[in-house]
Amino acid sequence: MKEFLLLIRSEEEPKAHLSPEQLQQHIEKVGSFIKRLTEEGRMKSAQPLEMEGRMLSYKDGKIVDGPYNETKEIISGYYHLLAKDLDEAIAITKKDPRFQEGIWRVEVRPIKKVEGIN
């Protein structure tokens, strides 16, 4: 099995606009999806990310804050997933109930294994 990092993208805090009932439904649907993948041995980890953070870059011999992309979209969470190949990882991702809400995008990236790291 290969490892994949799924970067969950959204604009600002998408759950902030959900009613308490919609938020509960979201938690139950996504929680069930994650639980099923974990039980199948496909999900290594999954977590939301805080909305705050910083972008660091190296420029002119020092580490600086920024630059920032001109977008409201942020990475709001991730899945660390196991699949046989990119096509299977994409097929699994398409079953994520987040897509039913129409406010999420997910970037699916294979993790490159480099000898001597971890």
Image (spheres, grey):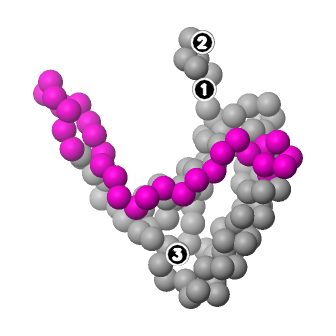
**Magenta stretch encompasses residue 111:** no
Residue under label 1: 112
Instruction: Give the magenta-colored segment's residue range.
Output: 37-65
When asked about the image quadrant of residue 35, the answer is bottom right
Marks 3 and 2, how far apart at CA: 39 Å
Q: Inspect the image, locate mark 3, and give the three-letter code of the amino acid beneath it.
A: Lys
Dot 3 or dot 1, earlier in sequence: 3
Residue located at (15% from left, 24% from top): 61
When asked about the image quadrant of residue 99, the answer is bottom right
* Circle 3 residues within 10 Å: few <14, some 14–19, many ≥20: few
Percent of width and height locating residue 7: 56, 50
Residue located at (57% from left, 61% from top): 105
Q: Quadrant of the N terminus?
A: top right
User: In the orientation shown, which residue stands out farthest toward the right?
Assistant: 40
* Residue 15 disc label: 3
Dot 3 or dot 2, earlier in sequence: 3
Percent of width and height locating residue 90: 73, 49
Percent of width and height locating residue 8: 56, 56
Q: Tell me the element at label 1.
A: loop
Residue under label 2: 115
Q: In this picture, is 6 found above or below 34?
A: above
When asked about the image quadrant of residue 58, the answer is top left
